[in-house]
Amino acid sequence: MIYPDQEIMEWVQQTPFVDTHEHLVEESMRTSGVLHSDFLPCNDWAYLFRDYVTDDLVLAGMPVFELQKFFMPDLSGEAKYRLVAPYWARVRHTGYAQALRHTLRGLYGEDDLTAESLPRIAERYDETVRPGFYAAIMRRANVETCQVNSVERIFMESKHPTLLPQDLSILEFCRCSAADLDRVETETGNRPTSLQEWLDIIDFYFTTYGRKAVAAKCQIAYSRALDFAVVTKAHASRLFLHHIGQSRHALGPDDLKALQDFLFRYCVRKAGERDLPVKLHTGHLAGRGKMQLARVRDNAADLCRLLQDFPDTRFALMHIGYPYQEEFIALAKHYPNVAIDMSWSWIVNPSASVRFLKDFLLSIPAEKIFTFGGDYTAVEPVYGHACVARRGIAQAMSELVGEGWIAREEAPEVIERIMRGNALRFFPNQQRTDAAYPHGAEMDTRSSYQKTRRE
Ligand SMILES: [Zn+2]
């Protein structure tokens, strides 16, 4: 066993991440404190548990009704602590919890959540959430920019577009559920009455936001397999009319799949025309009690047809397809249009991610991997996840150098590539930026943040 080499760890610490995947809400939602049942159920330290420690707490036996209480906005900090403490002790070594512990240590100066540290953690949480804290935390985490797949909008016109470049979500267009139609209607005022009208709406989004978006993003793997067949427009038109009609008979699963197949390929074509890379969720599912592992297991194999049919469109396959990451190495090894994204994977399984990175770098050009994305709605845990990822990258690189696979003098270039350079090259609308931090504001932010820490 080789532990991270000091010099390699130093290189990894100094290299900024270009973060390729977060779901951060706009900073103004956090600072306004206006709660939202989905994205901001409470605005206190418990919020930091939401992605993804909650999943582990339930696995460790915490009843769901207690978890719901834990996120209530008006429950006292002491009561919340009493709810979570027995389960926190059981989950503290998982990747999810390790990331949170790094966050508590690095941002709040507390080694652990205990009855004694709780009041200080609660206070630090409140002190931290103030205008400019996103930039301040990203700077502390040495994260240059975060690509955001907004949970609030199909495309978020962010107030901080350089710091938080945005994905255009195509999930709503191709999943096409009643909620998706509602969302589009809320955003555009349009409700389609035919497939063509739906395609016009999709075109509108690509025309309006395509130049600003960093990628087209889709997590339809949460609800279906990734085998997208070729379906004719005439057939899809008939299915669409039935789907949106008042008929009491909803589309059966095969027909819904065919409609989604058509819409998904339509969106991929649109993205390709604009040279927008397509990001796809693959592998493990967040949440609890719903994952169909047989479907997840087929993600890599299911994608081959699509990768072949769109050779000029670049695909970023996310989360290493865990736990089937070897198959994703095979895809990246064979298809020139595939890159692999390690977002989320460092905390889903840190040691598997170390092994994956080693395997990847010995079999595939180092150009085809992005090594960090926190996958959070809150910005604070990005700090802790970045610590876990840096530890893992340093571990993998140390082993590769120690075992003689990569020369020490080559390591800095590989590290720069996989943490930063690849993402800047792969995503054409990702601005290369020293201007990511609006400097006047950033200096203010940093000093106010440091002031917070001293107080
Ligand atoms: Zn995500």
Image (cartoon, rainbow, N blue to C red):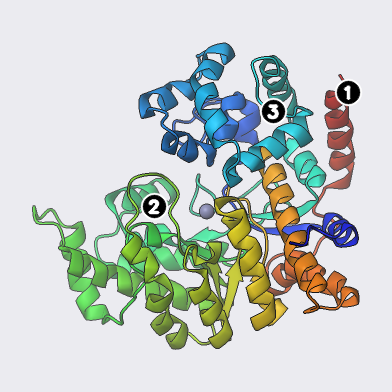
| Quarter holding residue 304 | bottom left
**Residue 33 visible:** no
Q: In this picture, is 385 found above or below 240?
A: above
- Kindly identify which residue carries mark 2: 184
Find the distance from the CA under tag 2 to the CA under tag 1.
46 Å
Earlier-in-chain disc, 3 versus 2? 3
Q: Circle 1 — which element?
A: helix
Left or right, 350 with respect to 233, comes to: right
Q: Which residue is mark 3?
A: 112
Give the distance between the C-alpha atoms of the residues marked 3 and 2, in whole angstroms. Answer: 43 Å
What kind of element bears circle 3?
A: loop
Residue at 69 percent of width and 14 percent of height: 116
Does residue 412 lie above or below 344 as drawn?
below
* Sooner in the amino-acid sequence: mark 2 or mark 1: 2
Q: Amino acid at mark 3?
A: Asp
| Residue 242: numbered disc | none
48 on left or right of 398: left
Q: Closest to the observer: 131 or 387?
A: 387
**Residue 152, position as x, y percentages in the image:** 50, 44
User: Which residue corresponds to the image point at 41% horizontal and 23% vertical from the top-left?
Assistant: 66
Q: Amino acid at mark 2?
A: Val
Count of residue discs: 3
For the view shown, which residue lies furthest in the left direction? 248
* Vertical position of residue 302 compared to residue 3: above or below: below
Which residue is label 1 attached to? 454
Q: Residues within 10 Å of mark 2 (few under 14, many from 20)?
A: many
Which part of the image, by quadrant, shows the C terminus? Answer: top right
Q: Is residue 98 visible?
A: yes
The kind of residue tagged 1 is Arg
Question: Residue 195 occupies which quadrant of the picture?
Answer: bottom left
